[in-house]
Amino acid sequence: MALSLLHGVGEYVTIIFDAFKRPDKGPVFRRQLLYDFITLGLESIGIVAFISVFTGAIITMQTAYNIDSPFIPLYTIGFSTRQMMVLEFSPTIISLILAGKAGSRIASEIGTMRVTEQIDALRVMGVNPANYLILPKITAAMLFNPVLIVFSIFLGLIGGYVAGALSGLVPPDDFILGMRSWFEPFTITYALIKTVVFAFIITSVSAYKGFTVKGGSVEVGKASTDSIVLSSVLIIVFDLILTQMLLV
C-alpha cells in the first residue's frame, strides 16, 4: 500500500513536471488554452449561477429562521450570508462541483486519448503530450476559476437579498447594512487563494488519472470517478490547511 502510494505520487510529480515545461509552439498552446477557457470555464457559468443564487437564498432564509431573539439585529442575516458565501461556499463548494463537472471531463478526455493511443502518437511525432494536453487546462482553470468564484459570491448575495425581501424575513436596507458591516478585504483574497489552489488540484489530479489509464473504456470511466473522489478529498484537506495558514 505504501509503495503503491509512493509510486503514484512520484508518477504524478513526474507528469506535472513534464507538463510545466515550456511549450514547443506558442500558437498551438494559445489555441488550446482558448479552447479550455470555453470548455472548463464558460460552460460552467450556468451551473455555478443556478447553485449560487439558490444557495444564497437558502442561507438567508435559514439564518433568519434561526434568529429567535429580538435582541439580535436583522442586519446580522446579511452579514452571515456574506461571510458564508465568501469564506466557504463559493470557493470550496463550487470547487467541489467543478471537480465533478470539469474534473471528470478532463480525466475522460485524456483517458480516451490514452486508450486509443493518441498520446503515444503525439510522443512519436516529437510532441510532449503532458505539456500539450495538461498545461493549457491547468492554466485555464487557475485563471478562470477565480472569475467564477467572484461571480458566485455576487449572485449568492443577490439571491439572499431577493429571498429576504420577497419572504419579508429581512428588510432590504437591513440586509444591505449587514453585507457592508465589518468587511475585511482579506476575506476576498483568502477566497481567491483557495480557489487557485483548488483549481490546480482539480485539473492536475484529473489529468494525471486520465494520463495513466491502462485498459479500455471501463478503465476510463473508473479513472473519471477516481479523479472526482481524489480531487474532492484533497480539496477538503487543503481547505483545512489553508484556513489554518491564512485565517487562524
Image (cartoon, rainbow, N blue to C red):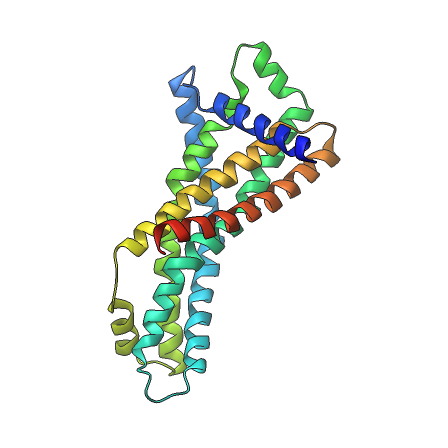
Q: Can you tell which quarter of the image residue 216 is in?
A: top right
The answer to whether residue 38 is visible is yes
As drawn, the residue found furthest toward the front would be: 2
Q: Is residue 236 left or right of residue 221?
A: left
Q: Is residue 90 left or right of residue 218?
A: left
Tell me residue 32's x, y (percent). Answer: 45, 27
Residue at 51%, 34% in the rendered image:
204
Q: Nearer the viewer, residue 131 or 113?
A: 131
Q: Nearer the viewer, residue 72 or 217?
A: 72
The answer to whether residue 131 is visible is no
Residue at 45%, 81% in the rendered image:
66
Image: 216 above or below 98: above
Q: Is residue 115 left or right of residue 53?
A: right
Q: Is residue 98 left or right of residue 23?
A: right
Q: Nearer the viewer, residue 173 or 84?
A: 84
Residue at 65%, 25% in the rendered image:
114
Tell me residue 106's x, y (percent). Answer: 56, 36
Image: 72 above or below 237: below
Residue at 35%, 48% in the rendered image:
192
- Quadrant containing the C terminus is bottom left
As drawn, the residue found furthest toward the bottom would be: 70
Total numbered badges shown on the rendered structure? 0
Q: Nearer the viewer, residue 226 or 173?
A: 226
- Quadrant containing the N terminus is top right
Image: 95 above or below 111: below
Q: Can you tell which quarter of the image residue 136 is in?
A: top left
Tell me residue 235's x, y (percent). Answer: 51, 48
Tell me residue 109's x, y (percent). Answer: 60, 33
